[in-house]
Image (cartoon, grey):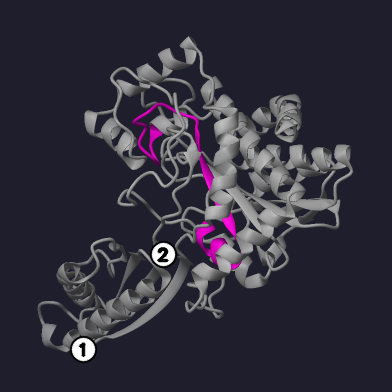
Amino acid sequence: MQNSDAVWDIVEKKRAEFFALSDRIWEIPETNYLEYRSSEEHAQMLEDQGFRVERGIAGLPTAVMGEAGEGGPVIAILGEFDALPGLSQEAGIAEERPLVDGGNGHGCGHNMLGAGSMLAAAAVKDFLAENGLKGRVRYYGCPAEEGGSSKGFMVRAGVFDDVDIAISWHPAAFAGVNNPISLACNEINFHFSGRASHASATPHLGRSALDAVELMNVGVNYMREHMPSTARIHYAITDAGGAAPNVVQARATVRYLVRARTLPELLLLVARVKKVAEGAALMTETTVRSEIISGDANLVGNTTLEECMFAQLERLGPPVFDDADRETARKFQQTFNAEDIAASYGRFALKPKKGQALCEEIFPLNAGDGTLVGSTDVGTVSWVVPTVQMRGATYAIGTPGHSWQLVAQGKLPAAHKGTEHAAKVMASTAAELIRNPALIEAAKTDHRARLEGTPFVNPIPDDVEPPLPEKVHG
C-alpha cells in the first residue's frame, strides 16, 4: 500500500492552494446555473495544475471538465460548487448573522466538495506522471446539484460514455463510505388554466385554476396512505393567480417534487400524481399542463468499489482534529437541539457519544437504513458508470443540512482538515484502481449484474432543456 502513501504526500503538498480555492468559492456563493465566477475559478485552477480544460460541457455554461494523463482507464472525480438561496452567514461564528439579508450561502458544503475533488484529481494526475502509469483522470465540475440536476443533463449529453469509474464525496459530520441509497426524484410544474370572472357578480362564469391547485394538493395528500413508505412528495404553490380575491383566478401553478426509492418506482408514482392533476382539472373544468424541470435517478451501489474505498479509509484512519477544532464545534453544538445530534448519529447507525463534537471514527460499510436520505444527481451517473462516494467529516456533529450553522463552518480549520482527508481517500482509491485493472473489471461486472433486467430511463426526458437563467455578472 506504499502507493497510497505516495499519493497522500502529493495531496499534502497541494492542500494549501485548494483550501484557498474552497474559501474563495465560499465567498462567492452562486446558485443553480449561475455559478459563473465559481466555475471560472475551478477552470483556472485546473489550467494552473496542468489539466486539459473544456468549459461549457454538455451545453451547460457553468460545467467544466479537466483531463490529464494518456491511455489506460478513465477515472472521473466529480465536484460541485453551487450554493443555496437565503443562507448568507458570517464565517466562523456560532450565531446567526447574515452577511447579506436574503443572500446565498454554502449550506451544503459544495465549496469544499468541489475543491476536495479537484485536489484528489490533481494528486492522481501527478501520481500517474511520477510513476509513468497509463491512465486518465478527469475532474468534472458539475453545477446546479441543488435542484438543477446538471449531471442528468450531462449523462444525456454523453460526457460520461467513455468513463470507466466515477468517484465523489460529500461533506458530512462523519467519515466513511457512503451507503449507496438515495431517492430518485422528479421536479414538475403543473400549470392550470381556467377562466377569469367577477367573483361576486358572475362567479358562475369563472373557472378557478387556484381551486384546481388546491384540489390537486388534497388529492395527493390522500395518496400518501397508498404509496411506498420510503417515497416522499413535496409541493409549493409558485403562482396563486394573483392577489385580487374578487377575481376568479384564471391561472395557477404548483410545483411538485416527487421522490421514490428506485427509478421504476418513481416513474409509477409520477404517473399517479399526473392522474390526480388531471382529476383536479376535470372537477374544476380547467386544463392542466405538466412540465418536468429536473430529475435524479437513485444511487446504484457497487460492492467492489465500496470495499476498495473502505480499505483506503481504514489505512488512513479518521480525520485528525485538535482541541481548538473540538472547542469551536462545541460552540456550534450549543445551537442544535438533542434531536439534531441524535439524527446525525442515526444516519450512520452510530451510537451517540456524550460530549463528542467532531468525528473520531470511520462508520462501517453499509451503515444506516436509508430512512434519512435525500436525492442527488450523482445517482444518475451511477446508472451509466460504476460509482462510489464517501462522506467526509467537515463539521460539528448535529449540524443540520442546509443551515446557517453549516455555512458558518465552511471555512474553519476543521473543514479544511476534513476536505484533505476526503481528497486522500479519493486519490488513493483512484490510484489503486489504475494500478489494478482487475478491480475495474470486477466493478463493471458488479454494475452490469445490478442493472440486469432494469433498463436505464433518464428521469430527464429528451425534450426537457436545462433551466438556464440569463447570465448574471458579479
What residue is shown at x 16% (from left), y 88% (from top)?
Answer: 205
- Residue 221: image quadrant is bottom left
Return the residue nearer the eye: 161 or 364. 364
Residue 414 visible in the snapshot: yes
Disc 2 residue crowd, few under 14, some 14–19, many 20+, Cα 10 Å: many
Q: Quadrant of the N terminus?
A: top right
Q: Is residue 281 left or right of residue 74?
A: left
Q: Is residue 339 above or below residue 320?
A: below
- Residue 126: image quadrant is top right
What residue did someone put label 1 on? 282
* Magenta extent: 378-404
Return the residue nearer the eye: 143 or 205. 143
Q: Is residue 462 above or below residue 388?
A: below
Q: Is residue 446 above or below residue 52?
A: below
Rendering coords of residue 316 (x, y %): 59, 29
Which of the two discs, 2 and 1, labels the residue nearer the N terminus? Answer: 2
Q: Is residue 60 above or below residue 170?
A: below
What residue is shown at x 44% (from left), y 33% (from top)?
Answer: 174
Disc 1 residue crowd, few under 14, some 14–19, many 20+, Cα 10 Å: few
SS for callout 2:
strand
Mark 2 vs mark 1, foreground winner is: 2
Return the residue nearer the eye: 36 or 154. 154
Mark carried by residue 184: 2
Answer yes or no: do the residues labelled 2 and 1 have beta carbons within 8 Å? no
**Which amino acid does the dot numbered 2 rest on?**
Ala
What residue is shown at x 51% (from left), y 71% (from top)?
Answer: 451
Rendering coords of residue 304 (x, y %): 57, 53
**Which amino acid does the dot numbered 1 rest on?**
Leu
Rendering coords of residue 196 (x, y %): 24, 81
Q: Is residue 428 left or right of residue 48?
A: left
